Image (cartoon, rainbow, N blue to C red):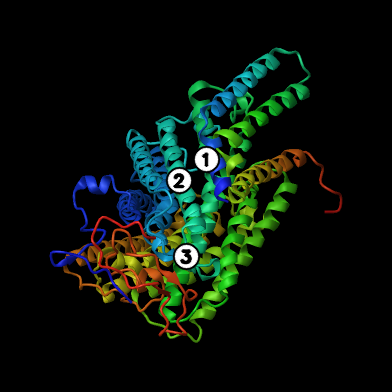
Amino acid sequence: MAAHSHEEHTHAQRVSFYAKTLWVLMVLLVVTVWAGFLKLPDWLGIAVALTIAVTKATIVIMNFMHVRFSSKLAWLFAGAGFFWLIIMFAFAFADYASRHWEPVQGW
Amino acid sequence: MATITAQTGTERINYLNVRTTVASWLLTLDHKRIGILYLLGITLFFFLGSLAAAAIRLELATPKGDLMTSDTYNKMFTIHGVLMIFFFLIPSIPASFGNFVLPMMIGARDVAFPRLNLLSWYFYMIGGVLATIALLKGGIDTGWTFYTPYSSAFAKGEVSLAIVGVFLVGFSSIFTGINFLVTIHKMRAPGMTWFRLPLFVWAMYATSLIQVLGTPVVAITLLLVAVERTFGIGIFDPNRGGDPILFQHLFWFYSHPAVYIMILPGMGVISEVIATFSRRRVFGYHFVAFSSLAIAIIGFLVWGHHMFSTGQSIYAGIVFSFLTFLVAIPSAIKTFNWMATIWKGRVHWEAPMIYALGFLGLFVIGGLTGLHLASLATNVHLTDTYFVVAHFHYVMVGGAIMAYMAALHYWWPKMTGRMYPQSWAKLAALMVFVGFNLTFFPQFILGYMGMPRRYHSYPEEWWALNLLSSAGASILGLGYLLPAIYLVWSLKYGRIAEKNPWGARGLEWEVVDTLPHPHNFERTPIVTRPAYDYAHPEEPTAIFPAPRPAYVGGGGKDG
């Protein structure tokens, strides 16, 4: 347990670790801009943009926010944030998806 | 049971006298002082919001719009809503009483992040000042809901400034939530297991979950309104390719659970007060504890009931309606368990208990009328009428503020070391109960008859009920003014309080001094009994492992 927490500490404080993370994010930023100029179909453009965005967010959460080095409880709370995001999207999109449905006859 | 023995001159060191400069308050990291700072700020905004409410009821005392123009009236109810929701109700119990008692209740010396705690107060105050400036610089007329596209494309006034104020107070709320979650998880005293926690702590835990998971959404949503307003980027305005109903989804995703941020801490207070003044362990402790979590979780799944008549899909409406009915279950669990606690309890009729009983009556009416609004068919008839206004005031004022007043009277001796006059306090509780019902019950009838909200004039036939409502508001106002007088009076002239004036169980009463020590406990207590163990009055809730040395000041490293 003590060795584990020492390891966490070392990882969290190494400057090169943050520098590398920053560089990866910068590269992904360039990829985002580059992808924006490609003439992709709408659905593919959105898929590419969202994939890059999720990757960037994951890197920030794992490295800058130290979730990678944190306890299971911190993972649980970080996961809960995303689960709640899914709830928000699911219910809101359910509204948009069903807004033009015709009423069932006999209701 | 040992007590803190070190003294400064003849007076024991406590959180009030340890340092007395203004800077010592403004830079304090003590959770108790931060709780008091919040209490002062919250009282200020409650007063300002009440002035707007008084102006509204004065205008509605007559059918014609003879006191103010419709435009001014719009600004007045916006001031009332913004100040009362964001700057009073949401932070009221968590930030003031939560900060003050929660660490003591779990046997901790402070919250997990004291600096973040202080920062949250500064965010709250700066946000409050910005919003007040916006409201005073001509005001805003969007209503507290900032509905788009009116707020983002048409409304005049300082909408963006008010939004920045609300944005900041949102982060203040998130900071408080994070602090309490980590504190409850990590800083409980030895022996303070989850099922020995006072129910107030369970309620605060559930509240903090909502604050952390929901508040970022409304903060960013309101920021998007400001972005659309300032830069003309189409997000919610249909003329620019946006969708106004998207705003409502995002806004209510937080703002409906926000109702539970207001009421859950109140429910926690009621559990404490009812147990103390019934001298009985809360009946169905586990059910009451888990019902707080159930309310927090289900509360996130029902926001669409605010949108039944605004263009949302009828199928989504059916699902949201069904889920809304489910919220009634954990709420009813709490209410029945409180009743069962009082039943066969040895009830003591002190002022906090009177407020708690008032809460029960009013919250039940507020909750049950929510079912009328959860039902799709009746909702269409009642949407945007005074029925809705009456319903949410029964929950927020009748519920949350009654609980807030109960908390204020319950923990006042611990906060100030003074007692207040019981007879005046009971009279005030009675006046609030009567005044409240007189104010808001007629509004159910008015709403059912079709009187719409947010208009400054109305047909003659609704005059009598409106006059009754305004008269009730006067009594209600006096009911709130009275405690302001006798509580301030008690600071100087009130009887010196005993350490545990109510004979309550719990660390904050049994272990902590009359006025708490700056670090709450000289040494960390070991909790040996469950909460509310009134069946075994001879057994202390906590023990100390070894004789405690005299306190020598400055805070030790133990515990």
- Name which residue lies at 26% across and 75% down: B498
- Name which residue lies at 20% across and 70% down: B494
* Residue B437 place in picture, x, y as percent: 43, 67
Query: Which labelled disc corresponds to residue B210?
Result: none
SS at mark 3? Answer: helix
Name which residue type carries label 3. Phe
Name which residue type carries label 1. His
Q: Residues within 10 Å of mark 3 (few under 14, many from 20)?
A: many
Quadrant where the C terminus of chain B is found in the figure: bottom left
Label 2 or label 3, whichever comes before in sequence order: 2
How far, Cα to Cα, is label 3 from label 1? 35 Å
The reply to whether residue B274 is in sight is: yes
Name the chain under label 2. B
Q: Is residue B110 above or below residue B132?
A: below
Name which residue type carries label 2. Phe
The residue that label 1 is drawn on is A9
The residue that label 3 is drawn on is B200
Mark 2 and mark 1 in contact? Answer it, CB < 8 Å: no
Q: Nearer the viewer, residue A87 or B81?
A: A87
